[in-house]
Image (cartoon, helix red, strand yellow):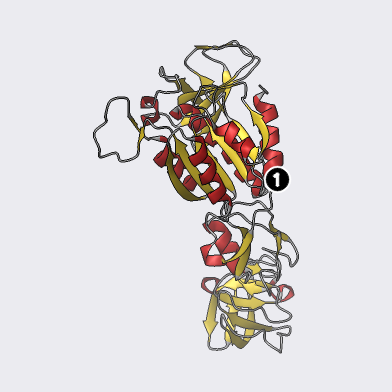
Protein backbone atom coordinates (compact mmCIF):
# COMPACT_ATOMS: atom_id res chain seq x y z
CA UNK A 1 0.00 0.00 0.00
CA UNK A 2 1.03 3.58 -0.58
CA UNK A 3 0.05 6.71 1.31
CA UNK A 4 -2.83 8.93 0.29
CA UNK A 5 -0.44 11.74 -0.67
CA UNK A 6 1.62 9.39 -2.86
CA UNK A 7 -1.50 8.09 -4.57
CA UNK A 8 -2.86 11.60 -5.08
CA UNK A 9 0.43 12.70 -6.66
CA UNK A 10 0.26 9.80 -9.11
CA UNK A 11 -3.32 10.69 -10.03
CA UNK A 12 -2.52 14.38 -10.56
CA UNK A 13 0.54 13.55 -12.67
CA UNK A 14 -1.47 11.16 -14.83
CA UNK A 15 -4.30 13.66 -15.23
CA UNK A 16 -1.91 16.50 -16.08
CA UNK A 17 -0.23 14.39 -18.78
CA UNK A 18 -3.56 13.50 -20.38
CA UNK A 19 -4.38 15.61 -23.44
CA UNK A 20 -8.03 16.44 -22.81
CA UNK A 21 -9.61 17.79 -25.98
CA UNK A 22 -10.75 21.40 -26.29
CA UNK A 23 -13.59 23.08 -28.15
CA UNK A 24 -14.82 26.56 -28.94
CA UNK A 25 -17.96 27.66 -27.07
CA UNK A 26 -19.98 30.83 -27.56
CA UNK A 27 -19.41 33.27 -24.72
CA UNK A 28 -23.10 33.10 -23.80
CA UNK A 29 -22.74 29.35 -23.18
CA UNK A 30 -19.51 29.12 -21.15
CA UNK A 31 -21.02 28.66 -17.67
CA UNK A 32 -19.72 25.45 -16.10
CA UNK A 33 -16.87 25.03 -18.57
CA UNK A 34 -13.15 25.39 -17.83
CA UNK A 35 -11.02 27.82 -19.81
CA UNK A 36 -8.41 26.05 -21.96
CA UNK A 37 -6.43 29.05 -23.20
CA UNK A 38 -5.31 32.31 -21.62
CA UNK A 39 -7.35 35.30 -22.76
CA UNK A 40 -6.02 38.86 -22.85
CA UNK A 41 -8.15 41.95 -23.37
CA UNK A 42 -8.43 42.58 -27.13
CA UNK A 43 -9.44 46.22 -26.57
CA UNK A 44 -9.31 48.79 -23.83
CA UNK A 45 -12.44 49.41 -21.78
CA UNK A 46 -13.59 52.07 -21.61
CA UNK A 47 -12.67 52.32 -25.32
CA UNK A 48 -12.79 56.15 -25.08
CA UNK A 49 -13.20 58.79 -22.39
CA UNK A 50 -16.93 59.17 -21.71
CA UNK A 51 -19.33 60.75 -19.28
CA UNK A 52 -20.60 58.93 -16.20
CA UNK A 53 -23.47 61.41 -15.79
CA UNK A 54 -26.02 63.43 -17.71
CA UNK A 55 -24.57 66.92 -17.50
CA UNK A 56 -22.05 69.26 -19.07
CA UNK A 57 -18.49 68.57 -20.20
CA UNK A 58 -16.21 71.44 -19.24
CA UNK A 59 -12.58 72.50 -19.14
CA UNK A 60 -11.68 72.49 -15.46
CA UNK A 61 -9.68 75.70 -15.86
CA UNK A 62 -12.91 77.46 -16.84
CA UNK A 63 -14.74 76.48 -13.62
CA UNK A 64 -11.88 76.14 -11.13
CA UNK A 65 -12.71 79.50 -9.51
CA UNK A 66 -16.34 78.63 -8.78
CA UNK A 67 -17.18 78.70 -5.07
CA UNK A 68 -20.08 79.67 -2.82
CA UNK A 69 -19.48 83.34 -3.60
CA UNK A 70 -18.87 83.24 -7.35
CA UNK A 71 -20.23 81.49 -10.42
CA UNK A 72 -19.19 81.06 -14.04
CA UNK A 73 -21.33 81.09 -17.18
CA UNK A 74 -20.21 79.14 -20.26
CA UNK A 75 -21.65 78.88 -23.74
CA UNK A 76 -23.14 75.54 -24.77
CA UNK A 77 -21.71 74.74 -28.20
CA UNK A 78 -22.82 71.12 -28.75
CA UNK A 79 -24.97 68.28 -27.47
CA UNK A 80 -23.46 64.77 -27.38
CA UNK A 81 -25.57 61.63 -26.89
CA UNK A 82 -24.53 58.10 -26.03
CA UNK A 83 -23.67 56.31 -29.28
CA UNK A 84 -22.47 59.47 -31.04
CA UNK A 85 -19.02 59.46 -32.56
CA UNK A 86 -16.25 61.25 -30.73
CA UNK A 87 -16.74 64.91 -31.79
CA UNK A 88 -14.31 66.06 -34.45
CA UNK A 89 -14.22 69.52 -32.90
CA UNK A 90 -13.52 70.02 -29.20
CA UNK A 91 -14.51 72.80 -26.84
CA UNK A 92 -12.50 75.95 -26.33
CA UNK A 93 -12.15 78.14 -23.27
CA UNK A 94 -15.50 79.65 -22.32
CA UNK A 95 -17.44 76.79 -23.91
CA UNK A 96 -19.12 73.63 -22.65
CA UNK A 97 -20.90 70.65 -24.16
CA UNK A 98 -24.16 69.15 -22.98
CA UNK A 99 -23.44 65.44 -22.62
CA UNK A 100 -25.38 62.27 -21.79
CA UNK A 101 -24.27 59.27 -19.77
CA UNK A 102 -21.93 57.11 -21.86
CA UNK A 103 -21.39 59.76 -24.51
CA UNK A 104 -17.79 60.44 -25.66
CA UNK A 105 -15.99 63.40 -24.17
CA UNK A 106 -15.08 66.18 -26.59
CA UNK A 107 -11.45 67.20 -26.91
CA UNK A 108 -10.46 69.84 -24.38
CA UNK A 109 -13.02 68.77 -21.76
CA UNK A 110 -11.70 67.00 -18.67
CA UNK A 111 -14.61 67.13 -16.21
CA UNK A 112 -18.39 66.65 -16.16
CA UNK A 113 -20.81 68.66 -14.04
CA UNK A 114 -24.18 66.93 -13.39
CA UNK A 115 -27.16 68.64 -14.96
CA UNK A 116 -28.79 69.18 -11.57
CA UNK A 117 -25.80 71.30 -10.47
CA UNK A 118 -26.23 74.01 -13.11
CA UNK A 119 -28.80 76.52 -14.25
CA UNK A 120 -29.64 76.88 -17.93
CA UNK A 121 -30.79 79.91 -19.85
CA UNK A 122 -31.06 78.95 -23.47
CA UNK A 123 -27.45 78.34 -24.56
CA UNK A 124 -25.93 79.94 -21.48
CA UNK A 125 -25.01 77.51 -18.71
CA UNK A 126 -24.21 78.85 -15.25
CA UNK A 127 -22.02 76.85 -12.84
CA UNK A 128 -22.38 77.85 -9.20
CA UNK A 129 -21.18 74.74 -7.36
CA UNK A 130 -17.58 73.68 -6.77
CA UNK A 131 -16.25 71.34 -9.47
CA UNK A 132 -13.66 68.64 -8.82
CA UNK A 133 -11.24 68.18 -11.69
CA UNK A 134 -11.82 64.92 -13.57
CA UNK A 135 -15.16 64.28 -11.88
CA UNK A 136 -17.74 62.01 -13.55
CA UNK A 137 -15.44 60.98 -16.40
CA UNK A 138 -14.82 57.35 -17.26
CA UNK A 139 -11.29 57.24 -18.61
CA UNK A 140 -10.27 55.14 -21.59
CA UNK A 141 -8.75 51.88 -20.34
CA UNK A 142 -9.85 52.51 -16.76
CA UNK A 143 -11.59 49.10 -16.55
CA UNK A 144 -9.43 46.99 -18.89
CA UNK A 145 -6.18 47.87 -20.61
CA UNK A 146 -5.69 46.27 -24.02
CA UNK A 147 -3.45 43.22 -23.55
CA UNK A 148 -4.20 42.82 -19.83
CA UNK A 149 -4.81 39.28 -18.56
CA UNK A 150 -8.52 38.49 -18.35
CA UNK A 151 -8.73 34.72 -17.94
CA UNK A 152 -6.14 32.02 -17.53
CA UNK A 153 -6.10 28.37 -18.52
CA UNK A 154 -7.87 26.36 -15.83
CA UNK A 155 -10.31 29.05 -14.71
CA UNK A 156 -13.81 27.72 -14.03
CA UNK A 157 -16.22 29.91 -15.97
CA UNK A 158 -19.38 31.47 -14.56
CA UNK A 159 -21.94 34.11 -15.46
CA UNK A 160 -19.63 36.84 -14.14
CA UNK A 161 -17.12 35.95 -16.84
CA UNK A 162 -19.78 36.37 -19.52
CA UNK A 163 -20.21 39.99 -18.43
CA UNK A 164 -16.50 40.74 -18.70
CA UNK A 165 -15.97 38.89 -21.97
CA UNK A 166 -19.01 40.44 -23.62
CA UNK A 167 -17.80 43.88 -22.52
CA UNK A 168 -14.54 43.14 -24.31
CA UNK A 169 -16.21 41.85 -27.45
CA UNK A 170 -14.98 38.26 -27.01
CA UNK A 171 -17.52 36.15 -28.89
CA UNK A 172 -16.23 32.66 -28.08
CA UNK A 173 -13.88 30.92 -25.68
CA UNK A 174 -11.69 27.85 -26.05
CA UNK A 175 -12.66 25.51 -23.24
CA UNK A 176 -11.78 22.00 -22.20
CA UNK A 177 -14.32 19.52 -23.41
CA UNK A 178 -16.11 18.03 -20.45
CA UNK A 179 -14.35 14.77 -19.53
CA UNK A 180 -16.25 11.76 -20.86
CA UNK A 181 -16.46 9.14 -18.14
CA UNK A 182 -17.64 5.57 -18.60
CA UNK A 183 -19.04 3.98 -15.45
CA UNK A 184 -19.42 0.26 -14.76
CA UNK A 185 -20.76 -1.45 -11.64
CA UNK A 186 -19.87 -5.04 -10.83
CA UNK A 187 -21.44 -7.74 -8.73
CA UNK A 188 -24.02 -10.48 -9.32
CA UNK A 189 -25.75 -9.38 -6.13
CA UNK A 190 -26.72 -6.00 -7.63
CA UNK A 191 -30.24 -5.19 -8.79
CA UNK A 192 -30.41 -2.19 -11.15
CA UNK A 193 -34.20 -1.99 -11.36
CA UNK A 194 -35.17 -0.23 -8.14
CA UNK A 195 -38.84 -1.05 -8.68
CA UNK A 196 -38.23 -4.79 -8.35
CA UNK A 197 -38.55 -6.66 -5.08
CA UNK A 198 -35.26 -7.99 -3.75
CA UNK A 199 -34.68 -11.71 -3.95
CA UNK A 200 -32.58 -13.62 -1.42
CA UNK A 201 -28.95 -12.45 -1.40
CA UNK A 202 -29.58 -9.41 -3.60
CA UNK A 203 -29.15 -5.67 -2.94
CA UNK A 204 -30.10 -2.61 -4.91
CA UNK A 205 -27.41 -0.89 -6.97
CA UNK A 206 -26.86 2.51 -5.33
CA UNK A 207 -23.37 3.16 -6.70
CA UNK A 208 -24.45 3.36 -10.33
CA UNK A 209 -27.01 6.17 -10.12
CA UNK A 210 -25.04 8.05 -7.42
CA UNK A 211 -21.81 8.02 -9.41
CA UNK A 212 -23.59 9.23 -12.52
CA UNK A 213 -25.08 12.28 -10.84
CA UNK A 214 -21.94 13.04 -8.82
CA UNK A 215 -19.83 12.98 -11.98
CA UNK A 216 -22.24 15.38 -13.68
CA UNK A 217 -21.86 17.69 -10.67
CA UNK A 218 -18.08 17.38 -11.08
CA UNK A 219 -18.45 18.64 -14.66
CA UNK A 220 -18.29 15.36 -16.61
CA UNK A 221 -20.32 13.74 -19.35
CA UNK A 222 -21.26 10.25 -18.19
CA UNK A 223 -21.72 7.05 -20.15
CA UNK A 224 -23.43 4.46 -17.94
CA UNK A 225 -22.24 1.03 -19.05
CA UNK A 226 -24.47 -1.04 -16.81
CA UNK A 227 -23.67 -3.82 -14.38
CA UNK A 228 -21.38 -6.78 -14.95
CA UNK A 229 -21.83 -9.91 -12.87
CA UNK A 230 -18.69 -11.51 -11.44
CA UNK A 231 -17.42 -12.68 -14.81
CA UNK A 232 -13.83 -11.93 -15.85
CA UNK A 233 -14.36 -12.54 -19.57
CA UNK A 234 -17.48 -10.38 -19.80
CA UNK A 235 -15.73 -7.59 -17.91
CA UNK A 236 -12.69 -7.72 -20.21
CA UNK A 237 -14.94 -7.61 -23.21
CA UNK A 238 -16.72 -4.55 -21.87
CA UNK A 239 -13.39 -2.76 -21.29
CA UNK A 240 -12.26 -3.53 -24.84
CA UNK A 241 -15.55 -2.17 -26.18
CA UNK A 242 -15.25 1.00 -24.11
CA UNK A 243 -11.71 1.61 -25.37
CA UNK A 244 -13.04 1.83 -28.93
CA UNK A 245 -15.02 4.91 -27.92
CA UNK A 246 -13.90 8.45 -27.21
CA UNK A 247 -13.70 8.15 -23.41
CA UNK A 248 -11.29 9.95 -21.06
CA UNK A 249 -11.85 8.04 -17.81
CA UNK A 250 -13.30 4.65 -16.98
CA UNK A 251 -14.66 3.94 -13.51
CA UNK A 252 -15.75 0.63 -12.07
CA UNK A 253 -17.06 -0.16 -8.62
CA UNK A 254 -16.44 -3.41 -6.81
CA UNK A 255 -14.15 -6.41 -7.43
CA UNK A 256 -10.91 -4.61 -6.50
CA UNK A 257 -10.17 -6.20 -3.13
CA UNK A 258 -8.61 -9.61 -2.46
CA UNK A 259 -11.60 -11.94 -2.68
CA UNK A 260 -12.01 -14.92 -4.96
CA UNK A 261 -14.28 -12.92 -7.28
CA UNK A 262 -12.27 -9.68 -7.26
CA UNK A 263 -11.17 -9.79 -10.88
CA UNK A 264 -10.62 -6.16 -11.88
CA UNK A 265 -6.84 -6.12 -11.51
CA UNK A 266 -6.47 -9.41 -13.40
CA UNK A 267 -8.70 -8.14 -16.18
CA UNK A 268 -6.67 -4.96 -16.52
CA UNK A 269 -3.41 -6.88 -16.66
CA UNK A 270 -4.87 -9.26 -19.25
CA UNK A 271 -5.67 -6.40 -21.64
CA UNK A 272 -2.26 -4.74 -21.16
CA UNK A 273 -3.15 -1.91 -18.78
CA UNK A 274 -0.46 -0.29 -16.63
CA UNK A 275 -1.32 -0.49 -12.93
CA UNK A 276 -0.32 2.83 -11.38
CA UNK A 277 -1.25 1.80 -7.83
CA UNK A 278 -3.48 -0.63 -6.00
CA UNK A 279 -4.47 -0.11 -2.37
CA UNK A 280 -3.99 3.09 -0.42
CA UNK A 281 -3.61 3.80 3.29
CA UNK A 282 -7.02 5.48 3.35
CA UNK A 283 -10.34 4.60 4.95
CA UNK A 284 -12.83 4.14 3.54
CA UNK A 285 -11.38 3.31 0.14
CA UNK A 286 -8.31 1.19 0.89
CA UNK A 287 -8.66 -1.17 -2.15
CA UNK A 288 -8.82 1.62 -4.75
CA UNK A 289 -6.93 0.92 -7.97
CA UNK A 290 -5.66 3.35 -10.57
CA UNK A 291 -4.42 2.27 -13.98
CA UNK A 292 -3.75 3.49 -17.48
CA UNK A 293 -5.47 1.53 -20.22
CA UNK A 294 -3.49 0.60 -23.38
CA UNK A 295 -5.07 3.51 -25.27
CA UNK A 296 -4.03 6.02 -22.56
CA UNK A 297 -7.43 6.30 -20.89
CA UNK A 298 -7.30 6.62 -17.10
CA UNK A 299 -8.99 3.90 -15.11
CA UNK A 300 -10.22 3.93 -11.52
CA UNK A 301 -11.34 0.77 -9.79
CA UNK A 302 -13.35 1.91 -6.78
CA UNK A 303 -14.42 -0.33 -3.90
CA UNK A 304 -17.99 -1.57 -3.90
CA UNK A 305 -19.05 -0.28 -0.49
CA UNK A 306 -20.94 2.99 -1.11
CA UNK A 307 -18.94 5.26 1.21
CA UNK A 308 -15.63 3.84 -0.05
CA UNK A 309 -16.76 4.33 -3.63
CA UNK A 310 -17.81 7.91 -2.82
CA UNK A 311 -14.41 8.69 -1.29
CA UNK A 312 -12.58 7.34 -4.32
CA UNK A 313 -14.78 9.38 -6.60
CA UNK A 314 -14.48 12.57 -4.57
CA UNK A 315 -10.78 12.54 -3.78
CA UNK A 316 -9.18 10.66 -6.67
CA UNK A 317 -11.41 10.87 -9.74
CA UNK A 318 -12.22 14.54 -9.08
CA UNK A 319 -8.49 15.28 -8.66
CA UNK A 320 -7.74 13.63 -12.00
CA UNK A 321 -10.44 15.69 -13.70
CA UNK A 322 -9.06 18.90 -12.23
CA UNK A 323 -5.57 18.03 -13.44
CA UNK A 324 -6.87 17.21 -16.93
CA UNK A 325 -8.35 20.71 -17.11
CA UNK A 326 -5.24 22.47 -15.76
CA UNK A 327 -7.05 23.52 -12.60
CA UNK A 328 -5.15 24.17 -9.41
CA UNK A 329 -5.27 21.51 -6.71
CA UNK A 330 -8.32 21.86 -4.50
CA UNK A 331 -7.65 23.54 -1.17
CA UNK A 332 -9.32 22.35 2.04
CA UNK A 333 -11.56 24.37 4.28
CA UNK A 334 -11.11 24.29 8.04
CA UNK A 335 -13.57 23.87 10.89
CA UNK A 336 -13.59 23.35 14.65
CA UNK A 337 -14.38 19.73 15.48
CA UNK A 338 -17.25 19.21 17.91
CA UNK A 339 -17.21 15.38 17.97
CA UNK A 340 -14.14 13.40 19.15
CA UNK A 341 -13.07 10.41 17.07
CA UNK A 342 -10.50 7.65 17.68
CA UNK A 343 -8.57 6.48 14.60
CA UNK A 344 -5.64 4.28 13.69
CA UNK A 345 -2.40 6.17 13.21
CA UNK A 346 -0.86 5.95 9.76
CA UNK A 347 -4.18 6.06 7.90
CA UNK A 348 -5.94 8.93 6.14
CA UNK A 349 -9.56 8.93 7.31
CA UNK A 350 -12.46 10.48 5.43
CA UNK A 351 -15.38 10.93 7.80
CA UNK A 352 -19.03 11.63 7.06
CA UNK A 353 -19.75 14.98 8.64
CA UNK A 354 -21.89 18.08 8.74
CA UNK A 355 -20.50 21.56 8.98
CA UNK A 356 -22.27 24.67 10.22
CA UNK A 357 -21.35 28.35 10.10
CA UNK A 358 -22.14 30.70 13.00
CA UNK A 359 -22.80 34.42 13.29
CA UNK A 360 -19.32 35.06 14.68
CA UNK A 361 -17.74 33.55 11.55
CA UNK A 362 -16.76 30.29 13.23
CA UNK A 363 -17.28 27.10 11.27
CA UNK A 364 -17.87 23.91 13.23
CA UNK A 365 -18.10 20.29 12.11
CA UNK A 366 -19.88 17.29 13.67
CA UNK A 367 -19.11 13.68 12.79
CA UNK A 368 -21.84 11.09 12.30
CA UNK A 369 -21.98 7.79 14.13
CA UNK A 370 -22.31 5.66 10.98
CA UNK A 371 -18.75 5.78 9.67
CA UNK A 372 -18.66 2.18 8.38
CA UNK A 373 -18.10 2.11 4.63
CA UNK A 374 -21.37 0.26 3.94
CA UNK A 375 -23.53 2.79 5.80
CA UNK A 376 -25.55 5.13 3.60
CA UNK A 377 -27.95 6.74 6.09
CA UNK A 378 -25.51 9.57 7.06
CA UNK A 379 -25.59 10.76 3.44
CA UNK A 380 -29.06 12.15 4.13
CA UNK A 381 -27.62 14.77 6.50
CA UNK A 382 -23.93 15.12 5.65
CA UNK A 383 -22.67 18.08 3.67
CA UNK A 384 -18.93 17.49 3.86
CA UNK A 385 -16.09 15.04 4.43
CA UNK A 386 -13.93 15.63 7.51
CA UNK A 387 -10.30 14.51 7.29
CA UNK A 388 -8.21 12.69 9.89
CA UNK A 389 -4.50 12.91 9.02
CA UNK A 390 -2.08 9.98 9.13
CA UNK A 391 -0.12 11.46 12.03
CA UNK A 392 -3.17 11.54 14.30
CA UNK A 393 -4.36 8.70 16.49
CA UNK A 394 -7.32 10.64 17.82
CA UNK A 395 -9.35 13.67 16.79
CA UNK A 396 -10.30 15.74 19.82
CA UNK A 397 -13.21 18.09 20.27
CA UNK A 398 -11.88 21.60 19.70
CA UNK A 399 -9.31 20.54 17.09
CA UNK A 400 -9.21 22.52 13.85
CA UNK A 401 -9.42 19.97 11.05
CA UNK A 402 -9.65 19.90 7.27
CA UNK A 403 -13.05 19.53 5.62
CA UNK A 404 -14.11 19.20 1.99
CA UNK A 405 -17.62 19.81 0.60
CA UNK A 406 -19.43 16.86 -0.96
CA UNK A 407 -18.73 18.30 -4.40
CA UNK A 408 -15.51 20.09 -5.35
CA UNK A 409 -15.44 23.85 -5.15
CA UNK A 410 -14.57 25.71 -8.31
Where 369 falls versus 217 (above or below)?
Answer: above
State the image coordinates of residue 168 (x, y, percent, origin top left). 64, 69
Residue at 56% across, 71% down:
53
In the displayed orientation, state which residue is furthest to the front. 233
Where 271 falls versus 177 (above or below)?
Answer: above
Q: Considering depth in this image, is 14 or 275 the residue closer to the camera?
A: 275
Q: How busy is the neighbourhood of tag 1: few (under 14 within 10 Å), some, or many (20 plus)?
A: some
Residue position for label 1: 16
Q: Is residue 357 visible?
A: no
Element class at badge 1: helix
Residue 135 found in image quarter: bottom right
Q: Considering depth in this image, is 17 or 328 the residue closer to the camera?
A: 17
How many dots with numbers? 1
Q: Is residue 351 left or right of residue 127?
A: left
Where 76 falls versus 189 (above or below)?
Answer: below
Q: Is residue 150 left or right of residue 334?
A: right
Residue 185 found in image quarter: top left
State the image coordinates of residue 290 (x, y, percent, origin top left). 62, 35
Q: Is residue 119 visible?
A: yes
Q: Considering depth in this image, is 81 or 331 the residue closer to the camera?
A: 331
Q: Considering depth in this image, is 400 or 403 the residue closer to the camera?
A: 403
Amino acid sequence: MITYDEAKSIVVAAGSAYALKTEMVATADIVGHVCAKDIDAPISVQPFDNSAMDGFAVRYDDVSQVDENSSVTLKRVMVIAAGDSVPEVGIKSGECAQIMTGAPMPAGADSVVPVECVSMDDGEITFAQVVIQGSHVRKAGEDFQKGAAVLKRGDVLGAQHIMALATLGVSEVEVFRKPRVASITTGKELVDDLSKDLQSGKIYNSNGPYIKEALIAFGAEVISCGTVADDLDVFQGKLKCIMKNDVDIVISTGAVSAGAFDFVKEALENIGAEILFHKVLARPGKPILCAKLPNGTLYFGLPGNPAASSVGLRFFVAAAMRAMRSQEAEKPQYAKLMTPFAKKEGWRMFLKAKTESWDDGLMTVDLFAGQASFMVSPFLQMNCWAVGKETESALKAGDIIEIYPLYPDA
